[in-house]
Amino acid sequence: MCGIVGYIGEREAYPIILNGLKRLEYRGYDSAGVALYDGTHIQVSKTKGKVADLESRVASEISTQGKLGIGHTRWATHGVPNDINSHPHYSNSGDLVIIHNGIIENYASIKQELLNRGYTFTSDTDTEVLVNLIEEIKKQHNVKLGKAVQIALNQVVGAYAIALFDRNKPNEIVVAKLGSPLAIGMGDDEFFVASDATPFIEFTNNAIYLEDEEMAIISKRKGVKVRKIKDDSLVDPYIHELALNLEQIEKGGYDHFMLKEINEQPSVIKDTYRGRLLADRGIIKLGGLEDHIQKFLNADRIIIVACGTSWHAGLVAEYIFEDWARIPVEVEYASEFRYRNPVIGEKDVVIAISQSGETADTLAAIKLAKERGAFVYGVCNVVGSSISRETHSGTYTHAGPEIGVASTKAFTTQITVLTMIALRLANEKGTISKGDYMTHLRELEMIPSHVAEALKSEPNIKEIAHVFMDAANFLYLGRGYNFPVALEGALKLKEISYIHAEGYPAAEMKHGPIALIDEQMPVVVIAVNSNHYEKVVSNIEEIKARKGKIIAVVTEGDTVVRNLADYVMEVPRTPETLSPLVTTIPLQLLSYHIAVMLGKNVDQPRNLAKSVTVE
Ligand code: M6R
């Protein structure tokens, strides 16, 4: 994780870097720093804490002048978050200064060699080792910075997106990428470097996304030269035209990005199916699927790989694919899949789900599946992300930037895409009746208005949040399609409020978790209309008998559960198959309001980062 930013051009670099770091803070926020070249010296200011802490420190510590600079916001891997371990890091001579997102796995042996040669280290980071390795190579081989970086990177094992410059050649920034993302914004005689395009969106619409094992020398005079790290050969990079705008990456009047993103769901779900779902004509058409549909239709099974919330969306998809398309599905944590020698055949289709498209474990799982001959399909949100490029084909969710660390709109738009794929395949295979198919297309089109309706319960949910904000534990229960929603509800609560919460299939409760239930235990039960409704009602009775406090998500007009539960959160009626798209809404709002009431940093919860680009 970590966010990196750089600028070289005719403007003052500091405001651009500072603003860029604020936009990248979702990637890590335990420390931050900048290095600026003021025409004579490199000036570094860095601190444990957030970008706002850096801003106060810079004001009293360094001059902010300079038209070349780099900046970093950190999520610690090697070395605790403190001022010294914060980036940027100098080389021993003070000539080079570097920022890094990633992990150098063989840093310990390199460090030992450098120690033997007399190098000293002030921090515990792998990054300080890397910058000194580059310095040593530069000296030993008597080469320029770019060449030294290329030689050094051929010696390191791990992942990186780096940016560095040399005070003796302050007209260029050298960048390189393997595993962590790196975009270069192409202005007129000015260039930007960043982990994603948001830091430079108001300056240019043109960007190069470096591929793995590529580096670039960015110079004011000579522009951007991209090379392969392995053999130094020149690359002709593709210049992407960006479709992002500033409004999308600002809070738009909401207190938090998370709340904005929760409220965006009616419109982004529509964006997800716009032009792809033509309910009146009975058509689902997904660009990435059309050329590969036979692969899905002939598949022995579908393996879904993902992490966190995206894994929960995968679990929902398992129900839908098996139910409608009658294709066996396995849903795997990418982090387990990649290391357990899985049996994968050429007739397996692997679906990788990821909001960021940068999750290291998911990326590694994709690579493994490809090596073993599987066809890999991506469901990603971030256009041009590593996963979208690594997969054979895929569908974008079009949810727009998701900045709150807790994933909300990514979940519902992922389910929307997966639902469309499943319906398309079921129709093609004839495993769904024409009537059911048409009904579900029309119902899917109704989901945005149902979500908008569910959002109207926010005042009621806020009151419930107030009652339970001091609870030490929560249990979330659901069955069938809503079991993954229970898991997702529990994840949302624990990650932003730090309250312990567990999600369970409601029927599993009696195999253990029921022992936890007493009058102190709030139990959130998803009890909407479904094939399992009566069974869920029985589960609620079991909780009541043990004095647990029941907060139930019910279908509007429900009376049975309403009479049993202590509190209810109503959602509009949908077919059971589509219900996760609405039942998740009150759970998102409940966790949001509890976290706000507890005074937690909702958008940047402790220890987390938005995209997990390390294993
Ligand atoms: O970007 P991805 O969808 O691959 O991210 C996967 C998880 O890291 C992510 O869903 C994480 O669990 C969220 N913080 C959950 O809200």
Image (cartoon, rainbow, N blue to C red):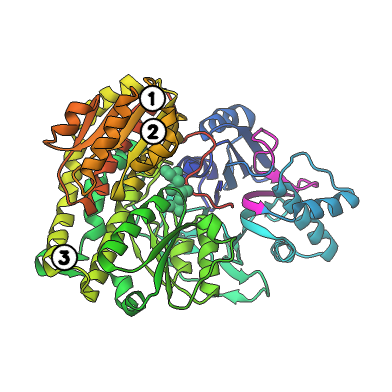
Q: Amino acid at mark 3?
A: Tyr
Q: Amino acid at mark 2?
A: Leu
Q: Residues within 10 Å of mark 1 (few under 14, many from 20)?
A: many
Residue under the point 31% across and 53% down: 399
Kindly report the distance in space between the C-alpha atoms of the residues bearing marks 2 and 3.
35 Å
Q: Position of residue 493 (x, y in %)?
A: 40, 34
Identify the magenta region.
79-103
Residue under the point 30% across and 39% down: 260
Residue 80 drawn above or below residue 180: above
Q: Are marks 1 and 2 in contact (CB under 8 Å)?
A: yes
Q: Nearer the viewer, residue 305 or 195?
A: 305
Which element is circle 2 on?
strand
The picture quadrant where one finds residue 109 is: bottom right
Task: Answer whether residue 85 is magenta in the image.
Answer: yes
Q: Residue under circle 1?
A: 521
Q: Residue under circle 3?
A: 437
Q: Residue under circle 2?
A: 475
Q: Position of residue 332 (x, y in %)?
A: 47, 58
Residue under the point 71% across and 50% down: 167
Kindly report the distance in space between the C-alpha atoms of the residues bearing marks 1 and 2.
7 Å
Q: Amino acid at mark 1?
A: Met
